[in-house]
Image (cartoon, grey):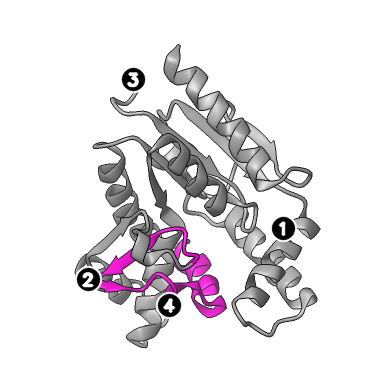
Amino acid sequence: MNPEHFQIAIDGPVAAGKGTVSRLVAERLNFLYVDTGAMYRVTAYLSLQHNIPFTDIPAIVELLKKTDIQMHNPSPEEADGRLTTVLVNGEDVSWKIRTEAVGNGAAKVAQIKEVREILVEKQQVIASSQNVVMEGRDITYRVLPNAQLKIYLTGKDFVRANRRHLQLQSRGNDVNFEEVYLDLKERDNLDMTREADPLKIVSDAWVLDTSDFTINQVVDMIVSKAKVMMSA
């Protein structure tokens, strides 16, 4: 059964360009961009802020249940390079959740079944009321299994690590390439081997390798495909 609104579900490994591509596609189509990874980053951020070990599942779940998470496309006043605005209990944490420590924590809390259940429900509610571009690690089969357009966005390891390295440097983070590359490989391994909804390619997904394309080229391809499907 197809959803009432048009849904573009994008999965893929870290640094494949999912965030930037999804945001631009949503902008071109006038859809809401939903960064599900930000929700897991929020969970890790909250755990770190409250000194809760990532192994203390009951405490993390209880804290998450009491937390209000809101997301919206950046307003003109928020045009500071962010892809989406993330509010936690009314506080703008869009950049606070983008540190390496939070990113590593997000990969760990994403393995917690109870955390995923809570966040998946929040994501499905968002997608039920409007057209969305939603990206993450399990969107095509867990969150939006009936999405009209499913995409697995990927790229070669070296290319993805280089993108991530440049991104971190542009934010003033002093990290070397080898460190970023090893971290990316570890994140990939965690994503693909976790028990709760591992990263995988569904049979009806469009596998799109971004290694040899510019961001705009990838966006153009996705927008063109979506428009054809919506007009059919």
State the separation of the CA atoms marked 1 and 2.
33 Å
Residue 178 pos. (x, y %):
79, 75
**Percent position of residue 207, x then y:** 66, 34
Where disc 1 sits, the SS reads helix
| Alpha carbon separation for disc pair 2 and 3 | 36 Å
Which residue: 76% across, 64% down? 162
Q: Which residue is mark 4?
A: 96
| Alpha carbon separation for disc pair 1 and 3 | 35 Å
Instruction: Name the quarter where the C terminus is drawn.
Output: top left
User: Which disc number belongs to residue 90?
Assistant: 2
Rendered position, 71 above or below 21:
below
- What x and y, as percent, mark residue 192? 61, 53
Q: Which element carries disc 3, helix, strand or loop? A: loop
Residue holding disc 3: 1
Q: Are marks 3 and 4 in contact (CB under 8 Å)?
A: no
Q: Residue tagged by mark 1? A: 160
The stretch drawn in magenta includes residue 86: yes
| Sequence-first tag of 4 and 2 | 2
Amino acid type at circle 4 is Lys
Q: Residue furthest top?
A: 232
Mark linked to residue 8: none
**Pick the front one: 98 or 11:** 98
**Label 2 with label 3: CB-CB less than 8 Å:** no
SS at badge 4:
helix
Q: Earlier in the sequence, mark 1 or mark 4?
A: 4
> Considering only order in the chain, which callout, 2 or 1, is on the residue closer to the N terminus?
2
Q: Which residues are magenta?
A: 81-110
